[in-house]
């Protein structure tokens, strides 16, 4: 911390006493509100990261969005890589609570070797409609979306597009800047389900991630439309591999290959992704630390999803369900988005393995229930 | 927003070209004025409270504007913003306030006795009358930039001052935080309640941070004098009543404002004011008097007349729907108010409303009788 102390930006702005400045969190239900006390606030408000990110920057989204009784939001963001160090006292307990008891001394393993995945090429396409793996990456040396300047954001865009433009083979593709998009391009991207729009979620808006929209934002995808990169949305980069059907192995293969190629290209230019052996890949939202990976399928499980033990099964498999429209949506017609619940403390291979094995089991259960059979004998143990 | 630009110096590591916003698709006052050279000149400056150029312009960068409505596209974070960023704000003020020059002086006149007439607008046409303005408490940053502590101090000082009012001004404060359902329902029915801003213009400037902390509504028992605390400005002061007695509305407005200002002075506080810009508020469009005096008036015939816009222009009035600035009128009822804020006094502006509305009601009556109004078209004020 001493080294970091020397690098911290000097705070020159006059403020009132810590008691007068402490937010009212009495109506709040998010991770930040559970952890932030007056004493902690008093201590942390004198600090700023070397780039000038302060405690108010970290917590503003959580103050402005008291939360939901059922959905526990994180309520804080990082403005740069150093946030996780400078504001450790706040973020470590939040990380621990959010990531299954992950301790400040724990080490996270990264494994992007697709050969280590067993199976995953035979999920029944009558049930598994599509497969997808996504993660995020942050470019070291630049501030993150809540705090970056226009110049930094453009720098991230420029570097990313340079790297992506040098991809070849089945990864060869094209970049579509949001700013210059033609109507035709926009329509095509919407039809492909690739287009991301300016955030409307108050969680994102309150943290300043939509500033200067659409400057520096864009979408890159390969010609075959199976590998996609979002630039400067919620993270510097979001990398997505996807295709119809149940061949998660192939999706993961392409994911790992593409990611590794991009990382190599960045290294050749003297930059790298934010990563450390404790937190793994460093991203804007503490919930995405570690692998930043969400691997999932759209799967038809109308019978299983109505079963009394559905939630229990998911929990034991360390999976979560969402509607097919994304994180805040409901399922339609018994088709669910099933993905890994964990991000930190497990490797990429381990998480995708959980999805592959878990979905295979869920489909077996669905088939049994279709035949009127019981599933009690194939209930899994807690992973 | 304060957290987005807490330490401006780090951005200076990037070249001007890299940081200068892309304003090619923009149509607001800020975009018309901010050149790359001006950006280069102002980008390393900050006010004593740390407000920077990017903070001033963020709302204008994030909201490119409308082809028909010219938004301002910038805000002040504190009193000093208007000085530190003069090079940007003076031309915007000039453009927005009809050529007001950096050397011009603004006159303040809150002497209600100077208003002539205004007590006899025909209530068959004029449904309600209202005058509003804003005030900022000197020494505290403005809503785009203030900290929670500062905002709470503004609330505390304001409520202390308001609670000393008596007679026709005796009233009560309702903080948004902790409001009961019953209180909320009543305030909605009285058309007093303000809600968390949804306009991207305001959100982009950081004015909704920490909502609803330290926001609230004070009103007198007679429900004719109302103060909003920590919405778009530190204070918004409103005098209103049904019918056409603008004179009375303005009297109460001036008397109430004076009393509030005196109470603040007793506690060694005052409002932000200077002889060039008048009352200093968050949005440059509200400088000067910050006053909007208006009526809801039934003009179904006049409003469809070919010369309606022309008449309004000459009378220095503007129309809005009865739901407020972005709404359309319903059933021929319009909100008619002064267009000017800076360069004329409060009395001047309310006089224009009183005289102008009186004329328009006369015109409406003529048109009802099928008579022409050509002889009544006013000269440009």
Image (tube, grey):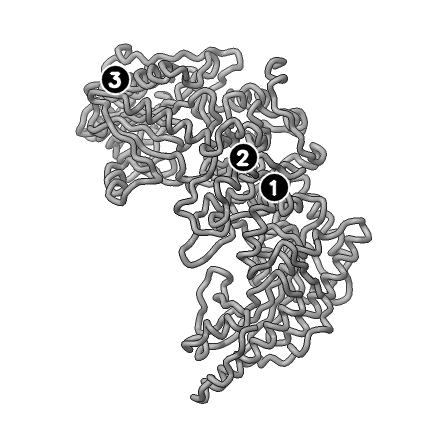
Callout 3 crowding tier (Cα within 10 Å): few <14, some 14–19, many ≥20 = some
For the point 72% across and 73% down, the residue is B114
**Tags 1 and 2 touching, CB below 8 Å:** no
Give coordinates of residue A218: x percent, y percent: 34, 34
Which mark, by number, is residue B4?
2
Callout 2 crowding tier (Cα within 10 Å): few <14, some 14–19, many ≥20 = many
Which mark, by number, is residue B145?
1
For the point 62% across and 66% down, the residue is B131
> Toward the viewer: A111 or B327?
B327
Residue with the mark numbered 3: A253
Q: In this view, does A87 lie to the left or right of B111?
A: left
Q: Distance between the residues labelled 1 and 2?
A: 11 Å
Number of residue marks: 3
Quadrant housing residue A283: top left
Looking at the image, can residue A323 be seen?
A: yes
For the point 58% across and 21% down, the residue is A86
Question: Could you confirm whether marks 3 and 1 are on the same chain?
Answer: no
The chain holding disc 1 is: B
Looking at the image, can residue A369 be seen?
A: no
Callout 1 crowding tier (Cα within 10 Å): few <14, some 14–19, many ≥20 = many
The chain holding disc 2 is: B
Locate the N terminus of chain A by quadrant: top right
Give coordinates of residue A56: x percent, y percent: 59, 32
Secondary element type, mark 2: helix
Q: Distance between the residues labelled 3 and 1?
A: 48 Å
């Amino acid at each position: 911390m001493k080294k970091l102390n020397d690098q911290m930006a000097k705070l020159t702005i006059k403020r009132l006493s810590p008691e007068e400045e402490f937010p009212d969190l009495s109506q709040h239900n998010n991770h930040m509100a559970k952890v932030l006390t007056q004493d902690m606030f008093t201590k942390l408000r004198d600090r700023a990261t070397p780039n000038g990110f302060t405690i108010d920057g970290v917590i503003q989204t959580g103050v402005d969005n008291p939360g939901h009784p059922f959905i526990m939001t994180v309520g804080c963001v990082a403005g740069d890589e150093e946030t996780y160090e400078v504001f450790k006292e706040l973020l470590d307990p939040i990380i621990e609570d959010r990531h299954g008891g992950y301790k400040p001394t724990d080490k996270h393993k990264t494994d992007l070797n697709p050969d280590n995945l067993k199976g995953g090429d035979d999920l029944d396409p009558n049930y598994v409609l599509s497969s997808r793996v996504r993660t995020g990456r942050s470019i070291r040396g630049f501030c993150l979306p809540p705090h970056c300047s226009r110049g930094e954001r453009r720098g991230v865009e420029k570097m990313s597009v340079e790297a992506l433009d040098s991809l070849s083979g089945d990864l060869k593709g094209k970049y579509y800047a949001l700013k210059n998009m033609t109507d035709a391009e926009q329509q095509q991207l919407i039809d492909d389900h690739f287009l991301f729009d300016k955030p409307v979620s108050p969680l994102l808006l309150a943290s300043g991630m939509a500033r200067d929209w659409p400057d520096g934002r864009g979408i890159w995808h390969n010609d075959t439309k199976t590998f996609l990169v979002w630039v400067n949305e919620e993270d510097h980069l979001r990398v997505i591999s996807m295709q119809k059907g149940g061949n998660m192995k192939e999706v993961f293969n392409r994911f790992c290959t593409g990611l590794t190629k991009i990382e190599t290209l960045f290294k050749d230019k003297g930059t790298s992704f934010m990563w450390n052996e404790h937190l793994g890949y460093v991203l804007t939202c503490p919930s995405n630390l570690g692998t930043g990976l969400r691997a999932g399928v759209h799967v038809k499980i109308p019978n299983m999803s109505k079963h009394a033990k559905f939630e229990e099964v998911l929990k034991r498999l360390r999976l979560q369900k969402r509607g097919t429209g994304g994180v805040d949506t409901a399922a339609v017609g018994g088709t669910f988005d099933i993905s890994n619940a964990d991000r930190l403390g497990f490797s990429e291979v381990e998480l995708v393995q959980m999805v592959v094995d878990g979905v295979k089991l869920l489909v077996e259960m669905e088939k049994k229930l279709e035949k009127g059979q019981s599933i009690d004998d194939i209930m899994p143990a807690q992973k | 927003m304060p957290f987005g630009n807490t330490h401006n110096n780090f951005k200076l590591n990037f070249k001007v070209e890299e940081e200068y916003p892309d304003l090619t698709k923009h149509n607001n006052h800020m975009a018309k004025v901010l050149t790359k050279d001006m950006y280069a000149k102002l980008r390393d400056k900050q006010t004593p409270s740390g407000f920077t150029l990017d903070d001033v312009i963020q709302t204008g960068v994030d909201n490119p504007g409308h082809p028909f409505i010219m938004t301002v596209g910038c805000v002040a974070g504190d009193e000093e913003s208007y000085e530190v960023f003069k090079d940007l704000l003076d031309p915007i003020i000039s453009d927005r306030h009809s050529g007001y020059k950096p050397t011009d002086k603004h006159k303040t006149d809150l002497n209600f006795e100077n208003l002539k007439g205004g007590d006899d607008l025909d209530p068959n046409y004029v449904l309600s009358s209202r005058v509003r303005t804003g005030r900022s408490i000197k020494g505290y940053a403005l809503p785009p930039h203030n900290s929670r502590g500062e905002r709470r101090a503004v609330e505390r000082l304001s409520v202390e001052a308001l609670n000393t009012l008596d007679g026709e001004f005796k009233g009560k404060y309702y903080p948004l935080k902790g409001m009961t359902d019953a209180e909320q329902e009543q305030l909605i029915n009285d058309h007093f309640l303000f809600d968390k801003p949804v306009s991207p213009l305001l959100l982009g400037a950081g004015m909704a941070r920490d909502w609803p902390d330290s926001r609230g509504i004070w009103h007198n028992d007679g429900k004719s004098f109302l103060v909003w605390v920590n919405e778009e400005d530190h204070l918004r002061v409103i005098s209103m009543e049904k019918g056409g007695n603008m004179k009375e509305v303005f009297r109460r407005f001036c008397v109430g404002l004076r009393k509030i200002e005196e109470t603040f002075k007793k506690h060694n506080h005052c409002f932000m004011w200077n002889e060039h810009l008048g009352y200093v508020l968050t949005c440059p469009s509200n400088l000067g008097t910050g006053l909007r005096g208006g009526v809801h008036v039934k003009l179904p015939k006049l409003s469809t007349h070919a010369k309606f816009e022309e008449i309004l222009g000459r009378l220095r009035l503007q129309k809005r729907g009865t739901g407020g600035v972005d709404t359309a009128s319903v059933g021929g009822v319009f909100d008619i108010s002064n267009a000017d804020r800076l360069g004329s006094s409060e009395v001047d502006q309310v006089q224009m409303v009183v005289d102008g509305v009186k004329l328009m009601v006369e015109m409406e009556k003529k048109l009802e009788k099928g008579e022409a109004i050509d002889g009544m078209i006013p000269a440009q004020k």
